[in-house]
Amino acid sequence: MAEPCESGQGEYTKDGSVDLKGNPVLRSKRGGWTACGFVVVYEVFERMAYYGISTNLVIYLTNKLHEGTVTSANNVTNWVGTVWMTPIIGAYVADAHLGRYWTFIIASIIYLSGMCLLTMAVSLHSLRPPPCGVNTNDPNCNQKATSLQLGVFYCALYILAIGTGGTKPNISTIGADQFDEFDPKERAHKLSFFNWWVFSIFFGTLFANTVVVYIQDNVGWSLGYALPTIGLAISIAIFVAGTPFYRHKLPSGSPFTSMARVLVAAARKWRATSPNDPKELHELNLEEYAKKGKFRIDTTQNLRSFSFDR
C-alpha cells in the first residue's frame, strides 16, 4: 500500500513551493489566482501612494518649502534615483536571508512609517515655513525652511525610499511564485498574471496623476498626502489578509555569488569544447531539478562559454 503522502503526491506543487513553516503545499489549497488577487489589488494602491507623492514633489518643495527650482529638481532626482537603487539591496536580503515574504512585510512597515511621517510634515505648521500671502511681495515668501523642517521632510522621503527597496523587487516575484512552472496550465496563468500586473500599475498611476494631484493642487496638501498614506495602509492590510493562500520559495542564496561563479567558471572554461549532447552540460538529472525547484539552463550557440549549469 502506498504511503498517504505518496498517494497525494500529484496534488503538491513541483517547483519547491512551501508554506511559511517550510512544508510542501497542495496545489488546490494555496497559490493560483486566489492568492494573486491580493497581490494585484495591493499594487493598485501602492502605485497610487508612490506616484501620489512623487508627481507633485517639485511643486511642494518650491511652493511650500520655498526651495529654488533647480535645487528642488536636483533633490527630487536624487530621491528618485535612491528609490530605484534600493531594490538591489531588498532583492539581496530576500534571496539570501529572509525570503521574499518577510522582507516584504518588514519593508512595508518601513514604507508606511515614512508615508506617515511625510503626511505629518506637510500637515503641521511647525514643520513648514509660513505660507505666502496674496501679495507676492510678502516677506514670508522669502523665508526658507529651517534645517529641522527640511530634515524631517527629507528623512521621511528617504525612509520611504528604503521601504520601497524591500517591496518593489519582491511583490511581483511573490505573485509569480503563486504559479507552478512545472504545470502547463499554471504556466499559462502566470503570463496572464503579468498582464493584470501591468494593468494594476497603470491604473494606480492614472488615479494618482489625476485625482490625487488634483486634490493636492486644489484642496490641500494634507489631504493630498493623507490619501496615498491611507491607500498604502489599505494595500498592506490586503496583502497580509492573503497570507493563508500564498506559496513561498525558500531563500536560494545571494544572486551576486551566483553571478560571480558564472564569470569565474566562464573565464576558466573559455577554451573547453562543448559536448554534442546538451544534456551533458548539466550535473543533475531531471528528477533532481524538479525536487529542488530549480530549472536547467538551456544551451545557446551564442556566448558558448556561458553554457554550463550554475
Image (spheres, grey):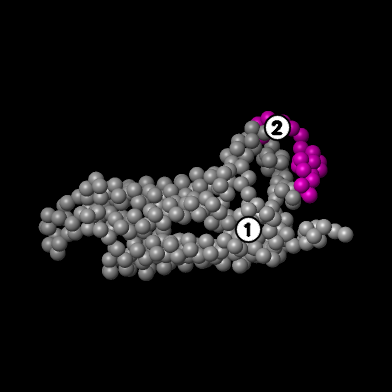
The disc labelled 2 sits on which kind of residue?
Lys
- Give me the disc on residue 52: none
Residue drawn where x is 63% and y is 49% of the image: 250
Q: Is residue 196 above or below residue 101?
A: below
Give yes or no for residue 270 being in the magenta stretch: yes
The image quarter containing residue 272 is: top right
Secondary structure at numbered mark 1: loop
The disc labelled 1 sits on which kind of residue?
Arg
- Residue 59 visible here: no
Q: Residues within 10 Å of mark 1 (few under 14, many from 20)?
A: many
Q: Is residue 243 above or below residue 160?
A: below
Q: Relative to 208, is 60 on the left or the right?
A: left
- Give me the disc on residue 247: 1
Whole-angstrom CA distance, mark 1 to mark 2, is 38 Å
Q: Residues within 10 Å of mark 2 (few under 14, many from 20)?
A: some
Residue drawn where x is 36% and y is 51% of the image: 157
- Residue wearing tag 2: 269
Instruction: Return the residue nearer the eye: 170 or 138.
Output: 170
Percent coordinates x, y for residue 51 in the rendering = 40, 60
Question: Between tags 1 and 2, which lies in front?
Answer: 1
The mark nearer the N terminus, 1 or 2, is: 1
Q: Is residue 87 above or below residue 39?
A: above
- The region drawn magenta spans 266-288
For this orientation, the residue located farthest to the right is 1
Secondary structure at numbered mark 2: loop
Percent coordinates x, y for residue 191 in the rendering = 63, 62
Instruction: Return the residue nearer the eye: 89 or 55.
Output: 89
